[in-house]
Each structure stands twice: as structure tokens, then as C-alpha cells.
Image: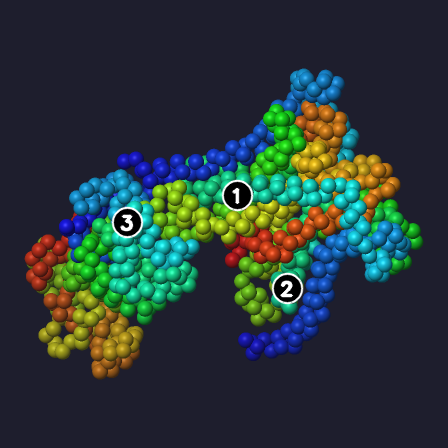
């Protein structure tokens, strides 16, 4: 049977000032791994809690397998959730923790036994079954929390920042494990994180949120390649994308000495926001490339590469552009460089709305599924 | 849409709080309200305890009642003396207990012992200590040659007041020490290190770091102790019974005899009301300073 | 750090020296201050009548000045085990009730958003400061009305009530520290509210209940004025009242020995509580008073 989770125009208002979820619609199907990604406080956990039934939506619906569950209590929704703190019951053994949800649902005890057996085999928890959570390491607790959800065989998995309490090394390891694990479940997964690496590596699709609004819902590559607006472009990718606000003249943006043709989607603006990722900026090879002269003022070593910050004098304020440059170039502070912007790597954004302006290289399908509010120019 | 999550939460909330509210209403609100009501009636042996409306008669009587003013004076002396002595002594003990030394755990245990013991029995112990013939206080003073004959501590109004104050200070200083010690432990050590690097003397860092940061705890301890001292009953009742000659009689003791000995319920109720209002006043003033000190402490760091 | 202030070396050494003398003296004084009155009473309770009445006082009695007579006399005069039993029963019952009524209210005040929550909290705080003398007159009415005089209930109910504010404050500060995720996890797992409270929240609450219970037990054991007023039957009296009424036949023959014995016996349960639970007591008192 195919499982499906849908959110229809979901809104949550705690009080007049706090509206962490604003008209969010999305759907997640079997075998999909959807990540809610956004800065802290943008409403990710609230969406998860609305799905779980821990909060009641102010308006809108939550549908599971086509059925409106908005009025059901969490226990009746057949969802399972991993909490950031893992929320293992401290007075119960691992076995009791894992079994608790099944026992409450009056699952026959033989069935409980086999399911627990499956999960412990799957996650290798055998030696831990009779311990209390207090006797487990952080990584072990995390696995038990995951086991507690798997054993339920729910209609939807919900995970709220399950890796954020692990140290960096373990986090990478567990991340890979989670991907395999939930890949086999054939059940919708909604995963919350503020960490873009987690979102990019784990997900089949990513929903970028800001300020309660859905900004973009797409596959990870598309989020990176074709960010729907300035917020998404700036939020995804590290180091952050460079943004330059440049004047336009007769369908050309004036960047330094070389005008760059505007994309087809732009209709005669006087100004436009140009975005380019530091990894796409490179040192100009010839005088024919559109390029900007500038002075290096900061070099940060990233190992194979240097992250070079360059100050460029324009008509007004000097602007800063950061570029990733191979260490073989041996740049020095105060040296003068010419930075080139390959046209196919340039993103264009409307100056006032921040929305992406379509370019020739964009895929033909519609980019952003949602209304993009005008207030995203932050 | 009705928020059924909140609605259920609210229902559960009331279900869980109502028993407590009922008990509190029965044992706290009812007696106070009842006293307000009764204070406007004459209910005593003179009228076979049949309430007769008396308007403000009880309050007028109180204004002219020398014994009442005397007990109020005694209560004030007792409260001011015990609370200030306890604060100084409690601070000293808290500072000692906050040092690290061998056996600190045992000393801390010993230091809260007096607080935990029944006041009535402790009062018996202190009566024995202040006994004029065999009391250990007189014995020590005689041995030191400070006096030549035993002092009748509990037989003289002033000395009796001093005795009950000492006994109360002994009994309740630990309470203040515990609160202040908790406050001391929450002061980050690097503040003192910073002071030491700046070359401050211990007294200077006490004035500049400890006292300001401890102010909230001090005022809270003060608040609790003021209220308790103001209502002191058991210690004095057992040690002196309010004597000699009313020299240690506090408002509480007076209320108790008015009701239980003279069976003057109306007047007793009026005494309860006035004591209650005085207490509210004291607490309100203390709370005002508490809020101010809290603000100042949070602004300072 | 030692290099920053050149003179810090000698000064701190000097301070160290002062500290080495002052601290032990202060510790000894603290211990003496807290223990001496109790020890004197303990010593008195084991002395013979002659030794008690000896002038100057006997601080280090000879073996023939020691006896258990005072305890024997105490039990001949009064049913002291009865008193201890009464105190125990009343304290335990009111502790259980205070926890049973107070902890749920504390949970609601910590977790659930109720209207009037702040008012309730303020009321609880104010009520903490009420001296019992303000209540006994009205309670006397209630006791008479329900004919509860000389009934354990006349003590158990008021003791429960006077312990409720502390219980609510201490337990509330505990619940506020308890991670809410656990309750959310229980809901997702399918626990109903009552089962969640009983199966998940309650087991985690037991240490805090113990802490609070010790405090309420102590305060109930020590209560005086209600016990003095509502109980007049000898065999129903509690330890503090019975001890206070141990006077002799006339004011001139006060039985100091048996009184000392009574003090010792009546305080032993509390001394034991303090010895075993010092940490919990301190923790409870501070969280009740400071966080409230
Ligand atoms: N129960 C609540 N009452 C009021 N405000 C809340 C509540 N829960 C969350 N909020 C607010 O909603 C916003 C979004 O919170 P959350 O969904 O937890 O963000 P995050 O994306 O970091 O998970 C925050 O500003 C938070 O303070
Ligand atoms: Mg969150």
C-alpha cells in the first residue's frame, strides 16, 4: 500500500505576533525523504508538531493516506517521531522503551517480540536491550530512539534534528546510516534540520523554510543549482554565495568593464542582483572574459583551496567578492587580481522581490511550487 | 477552528489544580475571611457566645488596649532583633560553609540540624540552659567570674526577651545559612579571580561581588523570616508563656489567650485581622525591595 | 597569571596564612554553636538527678553519675511511645496527602497554560508566609462544625494545607526542569493523559517527591499550635505538645531529666532524617524559596 502525507495550506498562529507556520502546503509519498531546512526559529519543529498532532493548526489540514487527521490525537495518527533529545523514558529499559508504543496499541505479544527482534537485528542493539537510557552513550541513545520509531511501522516518520546532539565525527557516520535505514522503509519521512549538509546528503527533496513560509521545495541538486530566490541562494552553499547589486543598461548588466547580457526572463530592470558562488568565481585567463579588478585583503586556508576575499572598487561603496582559488596560485594579501564570472554560473535575482529570474540554462519545469512572499529580501 | 489540544490541556489543568485550590481555600482563605466577618461582632462569655453585631467596637477597643500595644511592641522588638542577628550570623556561617575544607559535608549537616528540630522541644532545651539555678549559661558566667550569683534569666522581662531572642536565633539561623549558601555557590568563581587579579582585598571583593550578587537571596530570606518571626508562637509559649508580666508576650500569644483562655472570639478575630494586615504590609514592603534588588542584580551582571 | 601583579605573590601567601588560622576556628565555632545546646540536653538526659542538680554543672560525668533513669521516668509518667506514634502517623499521612494533591497542581502550573496561573502562583507564594496563628481561629470553627476535635483528621488536614504551598513551589521548579520532549514522546507513542502522568511522569518524579516529602514531614512533625488546640486527649497528643506539657505537679519541681529525655527522643527521628538526607533538604529548601 502506498503511504502519503499531505499538508494543505497549513497555518499555526500562537499569538498575534508569533506565526511560525504560514500557509504551507506540501506532500510526501512512500519512499520519499523530505527535509525541512531553515534557520533556527523558522517554524520547522512547529510543522513537525502539527503533523504529529502535538499542536493543533490554526487553519489548514494534515492528511495521512488521504484521510484528514487534523482532529486526531497524536496516538491515533500512526506516526512515529525521533526527538532532538531522543526523549527515551529514563526509568524503562531499552526493550521497554522500544515496546511501549506497541503495547499501548494492544499489539499481540508474539508480534511485539518478532518486531523487536527484527529491529534489534537491523540496528545491532542486542547488548543494550536490558540497559537503561542513562547507561548508554549518545550514539546508542540515538539508535534506540530510531529503533523505537522503526518498530512501530508507522504511516509517517518524523525526525526533529536527530543528529544535533552527536559530536561531529559520529554525526557523519550516523547520517550515512540513517540514509540507508530509512531508504529501506518505503514510508514517507519528514526530517527537520538547520544543517544544509544533512539536508543535501539525506533527502530526496528539500523544503527550504524561512519566516514561516515555504521558500522552495525541490530535489537537493536543484536547490543548489537553481535557488528560487535570494534567501535560498544565500542559505544553501558554503561559503555563502556572493551577491552584487549592479546597474543595467539596454538588457545588459554592467559588471566592471564588461557588460553581461541579462537573462531572457528579465524585463528591462534598471538594477539587478547578480549572484555567484565563491566556487564558481575564478581568476580571469584572458582580457575577453567579463571580469572585475580587485585587491586581496583576506586569505583563508581551506586545505586544497584558499577562500580569498577581494575588495572591488566601483562607482560607490567598495564591494567584497569571495572566491575559491586553488592554492597553486599563491596569492598574497594586497595583490591585485582579476576575477571572472562564468555566465553559465551566474544567478539573477529581482532586486525588489528577491525572486529568481529564469535563465536559458534553467530546467524547463516550474521552479518554485509556492507563493514567494515579497518580504524575503533580507 | 477550536484548538482541542489547548482545550484538553486546560481541562486537565483544572482537574489537577482544583483539589489543591479547595484545600488552600478551606485552610487559608476561609479562616481569614471568617475572621474579618467575626471581627464586627461581640462573641464572648458575656453574651454566651451568641454573636451580637458590634460594628467597629472591637477595633476601637483594640486602639485603647494597652496590652495589645505592648504585645505589638514586643513582637516588633523580637522580629527586628532576631532577623537582623540571624542575617549577620547566617551570612557568616554561609561564608564558612562555602569554603572547602576537610569534613565540610558533616559540618553542613550539623549546620542545618537546629532548623530541622521541633521548636517546642528546642524551647524546652533552652529553658533548661537559661535555668536560674542549674542553667549552663549561669554556670559558665560564674566560672568565668563575670557574675557572682546566678541570673534569673527568664524571671526578668528584659532578660527573658533576650533569652527567647537567643533561642530563636539559634533555631532559625540555619535556614538563612542554607539560602545564602545556595546563593554563594551560584556566584561564578572567575568573578573572584578577576577581583584578585585586580588586587582587591577579600573585604573589597565581598562588598563588590558577594553582597550585590547575593542581594536577591538575602531579601528572600528576609521575607520568609520576617513573616515567621512576626507570627512567633511556640518558642515563646513554651519558654516563658509570654511572661514574666507580659514581658515576652507577642501578638500571637495574645491572640491565643484571647480566644482559648478568655473565649473572646470577636475580639480575637479583630486581633487576627489586624495582625494579618500588618503582615501583608511588611511583606509588601519587603517584596518591593526584593523586586528592586532583583532588577539591580540582573542589571549588574 | 602570577606574573601580572608582582606583589600578588607575597599577599596571597599572607592571605593563605590568615585563612589557615581563621577557617578552622570559624568551623569549630559553627559546629559548637549548632551542636552545644543539643549535646547539653543529651548529656542531661543521661545524668542522675543528683548530677543534674550539682553546682557547678557537671560537664564530664563520672560513670556513677550516668543512668537511664530519666528515660524510665519519662515512660512511667507518660505514654511517650503513643506520642511518637501519633506524630508519625499524622506527619506521614499529611505528607502523602500534600504530595498527592500538591504535585499534580505543581505539574499543571509548570506545564499547562491555565488562565489565572499567575494569580494562583502569587496566592501560593503569599500563603507560604501565613503564620498558623492567623488560621487557628477559623479552623477551630471548622473542627467544631465537623466535630473533628481529638481526631487525627483535625491535624492531618491543616498540616496537608500548610505544606501545600511549599510542595507546589518545589515540585513546580522540578517540573520546569523536566524535558517536555518526554511527554510529547509519550503522546506520540499513544499514551492517554492519565496514563502518561502515571506511567511516564510519575516515575521520573519520585526523587523530587522524596525531597519534598522530607521537608513536609519535618514541618508536620514540628507543628505546635494546631496540635495544642485541636487535640486534648492525652493518648492522641503529638510529641511537641506532649513534651511542652511535661511540667511537674507544681512549678517548683520541674522534671528536667525526663524533659531532656523527651527532647532527645522527640528529635531523634528528625536528626536521622537530616543525617541521611542533608543534600535533599538543602536542595528542596533552596528550590522552594529561591526559584519561587
Ligand atoms: N508553544 C509555543 N508558544 C508560543 N510560541 C512558540 C511555541 N512553540 C514555538 N514557538 C515559537 O515559534 C517559532 C518557531 O519555533 P520552532 O518551530 O521551534 O522553530 P525551529 O525552526 O527552530 O524548529 C519560534 O519563534 C518559537 O519561539
Ligand atoms: Mg526546532
Q: Residues within 10 Å of mark 1 (few under 14, many from 20)?
A: many
To which residue does mark 3 refer? A108
Q: Position of residue A68 (x, y in %)?
A: 21, 41
Q: Nearer the viewer, mark 2 or mark 1?
A: 1
Q: Position of residue C163 (x, y in %)?
A: 58, 41
Q: Residues within 10 Å of mark 3 (few under 14, many from 20)?
A: few
Asked if ligand 2 lies within 8 A of label 3, the reply is no
Q: Is residue C255 above or below residue A194?
A: above
Q: Position of residue A98 (x, y in %)?
A: 33, 55
Which residue is painted at 53% across and 56% down in the image? B300
Q: Chain of mark 2?
A: B
Which residue is painted at 87% across and 59% down in the image? B144
Asked if ligand 2 lies within 8 A of label 2, the reply is no
> Would you say C116 lies left or right of B196 here?
left
To which residue does mark 2 refer? B104
To which residue does mark 1 refer? C99
Task: Give the label on residue A177, or none.
Answer: none
Which residue is painted at 24% across and 69% down in the image? A321
Task: Report helix, strand or loop for mark 1.
Answer: helix
> Would you say B142 lies left or right of C152 here?
right
Task: Report helix, strand or loop for mark 2.
Answer: helix
Q: Is residue A19 visible?
A: no
Q: Position of residue C212 (x, y in %)?
A: 55, 48
Determine whether label 3 and label 2 are within 8 Å by CB: no
Q: Nearer the viewer, mark 1 or mark 3?
A: 3
Amino acid at each position: 500500500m502506498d503511504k502519503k502525507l499531505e499538508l494543505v495550506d497549513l497555518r499555526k498562529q500562537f499569538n498575534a505576533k508569533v506565526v511560525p507556520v504560514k500557509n504551507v502546503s506540501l506532500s510526501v509519498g512512500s519512499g520519499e525523504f523530505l527535509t525541512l531546512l531553515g534557520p533556527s526559529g523558522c517554524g520547522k519543529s512547529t510543522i513537525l508538531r502539527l503533523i504529529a498532532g502535538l499542536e493543533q493548526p490554526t487553519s489548514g489540514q494534515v492528511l495521512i493516506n488521504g484521510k484528514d487527521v487534523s482532529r486526531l490525537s497524536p496516538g491515533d495518527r500512526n506516526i512515529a517521531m525521533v526527538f532532538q533529545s531522543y526523549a527515551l523514558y529514563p526509568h524503562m529499559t531499552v526493550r521497554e522503551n522500544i515496546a511501549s508504543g506497541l503495547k499501548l496499541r494492544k499489539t499481540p505479544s508474539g508480534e511485539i517480540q518478532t518486531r523487536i527482534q527484527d529491529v534489534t537485528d537491523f540496528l545491532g542493539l542486542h547488548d543494550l536491550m536490558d540497559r537503561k537510557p542513562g547507561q548508554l552513550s549518545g550514539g546508542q541513545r540515538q539508535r534506540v530512539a530510531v529503533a523505537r520509531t522503526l518498530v512501530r511501522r508507522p504511516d509517517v516518520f518524523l525526525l526533529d534534528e536527530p543528529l544535533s546532539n552527536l559530536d561531529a565525527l559520529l554525526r557523519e557516520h550516523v547520517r550515512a546510516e540513517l540514509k540507508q535505514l530509512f531508504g529501506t522503509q518505503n514510508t514517507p519521512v519528514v526530517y527537520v534540520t538547520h544543517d544544509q549538509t544533512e539536508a543535501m546528503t539525506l533527502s530526496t527533496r528539500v523544503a527550504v523554510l524561512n519566516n514561516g513560509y515555504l521558500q522552495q521545495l525541490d530535489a537537493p541538486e536543484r536547490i543548489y543549482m537553481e535557488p528560487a530566490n535570494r534567501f535560498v541562494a544565500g542559505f544553501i552553499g558554503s561559503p555563502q554565495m556572493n551577491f552584487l547589486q549592479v546597474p543595467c543598461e539596454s538588457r545588459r548588466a554592467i559588471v566592471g568593464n564588461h557588460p553581461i547580457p541579462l537573462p531572457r526572463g528579465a524585463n528591462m530592470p534598471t538594477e539587478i542582483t547578480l549572484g555567484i558562488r565563491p566556487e564558481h568565481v575564478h581568476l580571469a585567463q584572458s582580457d575577453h572574459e567579463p571580469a572585475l579588478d580587485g585587491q586581496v585583503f583576506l586569505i583563508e586556508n581551506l586545505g586544497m583551496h584558499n577562500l580569498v576575499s577581494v575588495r572591488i572598487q566601483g562607482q560607490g561603496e567598495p564591494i567584497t567578492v569571495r572566491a575559491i582559488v586553488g592554492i597553486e596560485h599563491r596569492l598574497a594579501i594586497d595583490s591585485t587580481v582579476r576575477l571572472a564570472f562564468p555566465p553559465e554560473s551566474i544567478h539573477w535575482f529581482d532586486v525588489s522581490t528577491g525572486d529568481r529570474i529564469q535563465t536559458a540554462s534553467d530546467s524547463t519545469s516550474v521552479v518554485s511550487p509556492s507563493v514567494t512572499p515579497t518580504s524575503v529580501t533580507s | 477552528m477550536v484548538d482541542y489540544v489547548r482545550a484538553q490541556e486546560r481541562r486537565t489543568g483544572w482537574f489537577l489544580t482544583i483539589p489543591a485550590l479547595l484545600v488552600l481555600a478551606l485552610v487559608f482563605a476561609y479562616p481569614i475571611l471568617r475572621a474579618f466577618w467575626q471581627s464586627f461582632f461581640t462573641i464572648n462569655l458575656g453574651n454566651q457566645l451568641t454573636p451580637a453585631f458590634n460594628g467597629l467596637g472591637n477595633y476601637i477597643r483594640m486602639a485603647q488596649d494597652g496590652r495589645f500595644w505592648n504585645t505589638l511592641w514586643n513582637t516588633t522588638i523580637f522580629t527586628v532583633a532576631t532577623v537582623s542577628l540571624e542575617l549577620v550570623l547566617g551570612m557568616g556561617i554561609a561564608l564558612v560553609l562555602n569554603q572547602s575544607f576537610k569534613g565540610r559535608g558533616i559540618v553542613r549537616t550539623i549546620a542545618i540540624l537546629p532548623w530541622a528540630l521541633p521548636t517546642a522541644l528546642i524551647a524546652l532545651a533552652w529553658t533548661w540552659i537559661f535555668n536560674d539555678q542549674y542553667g549552663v549559661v549561669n554556670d559558665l558566667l560564674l566560672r568565668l567570674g563575670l557574675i557572682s550569683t546566678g541570673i534569673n534569666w527568664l524571671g526578668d522581662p528584659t532578660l527573658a526577651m533576650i533569652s527567647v531572642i537567643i533561642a530563636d536565633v539559634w533555631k532559625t539561623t540555619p535556614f538563612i545559612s542554607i539560602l545564602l549558601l545556595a546563593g554563594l555557590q551560584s556566584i561564578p568563581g572567575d568573578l573572584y579571580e578577576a577581583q584578585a587579579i585586580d588586587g582587591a582585598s577579600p573585604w573589597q571583593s565581598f562588598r563588590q561581588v558577594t553582597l550585590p550578587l547575593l542581594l536577591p537571596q538575602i531579601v528572600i530570606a528576609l521575607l520568609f523570616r520576617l513573616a515567621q518571626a512576626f507570627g512567633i508562637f511556640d518558642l515563646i509559649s513554651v519558654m516563658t508563656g509570654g511572661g514574666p508580666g507580659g514581658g515576652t508576650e507577642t501578638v500571637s500569644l495574645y491572640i491565643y489567650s484571647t480566644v482559648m483562655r478568655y473565649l473572646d472570639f470577636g475580639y480575637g478575630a479583630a486581633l487576627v485581622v489586624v495582625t494579618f494586615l500588618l503582615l501583608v504590609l511588611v511583606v509588601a514592603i519587603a517584596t518591593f525591595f526584593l523586586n528592586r534588588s532583583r532588577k539591580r542584580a540582573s542589571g549588574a551582571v | 597569571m602570577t606574573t601580572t601583579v608582582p606583589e600578588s605573590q607575597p599577599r596571597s601567601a599572607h592571605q593563605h596564612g590568615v585563612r589557615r588560622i581563621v577557617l578552622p576556628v570559624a568551623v569549630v565555632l559553627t559546629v559548637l554553636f549548632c551542636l552545644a545546646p543539643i549535646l547539653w540536653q543529651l548529656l542531661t538526659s543521661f545524668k542522675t538527678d543528683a548530677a543534674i542538680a550539682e553546682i557547678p554543672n557537671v560537664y564530664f560525668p563520672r560513670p556513677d553519675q550516668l543512668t537511664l533513669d530519666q528515660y524510665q521516668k519519662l515512660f512511667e509518667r507518660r505514654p511517650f511511645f503513643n506520642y511518637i506514634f501519633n506524630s508519625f502517623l499524622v506527619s506521614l499521612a499529611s505528607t502523602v496527602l500534600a504530595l498527592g494533591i500538591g504535585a499534580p497542581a505543581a505539574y499543571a502550573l509548570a506545564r499547562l497554560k491555565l488562565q489565572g496561573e499567575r494569580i494562583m502562583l502569587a496566592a501560593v507564594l503569599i500563603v507560604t508566609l501565613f503564620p498558623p496563628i492567623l488560621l487557628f481561629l477559623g479552623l477551630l470553627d471548622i473542627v467544631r462544625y465537623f466535630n473533628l476535635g481529638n481526631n487525627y483528621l483535625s491535624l492531618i488536614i491543616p498540616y496537608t494545607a500548610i505544606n501545600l504551598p511549599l510542595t507546589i513551589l518545589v515540585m513546580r521548579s522540578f517540573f520546569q526542569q523536566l524535558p517536555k520532549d518526554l511527554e510529547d514522546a509519550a503522546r506520540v507513542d499513544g499514551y492517554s493523559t492519565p496514563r502518561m502522568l502515571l506511567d511516564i511522569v510519575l516515575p521520573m518524579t519520585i526523587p523530587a517527591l522524596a525531597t519534598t516529602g522530607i521537608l513536609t514531614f519535618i514541618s508536620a512533625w514540628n507543628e505546635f499550635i494546631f496540635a495544642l488546640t485541636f487535640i486534648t486527649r492525652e493518648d492522641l497528643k503529638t510529641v511537641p505538645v506532649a513534651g511542652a506539657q511535661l511540667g511537674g505537679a507544681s512549678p517548683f519541681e520541674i522534671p528536667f531529666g525526663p524533659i531532656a529525655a523527651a527532647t532527645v527522643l522527640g528529635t531523634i527521628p528528625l536528626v536521622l532524617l537530616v543525617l541521611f538526607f542533608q543534600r535533599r533538604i538543602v536542595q528542596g529548601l533552596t528550590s522552594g524559596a529561591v526559584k519561587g
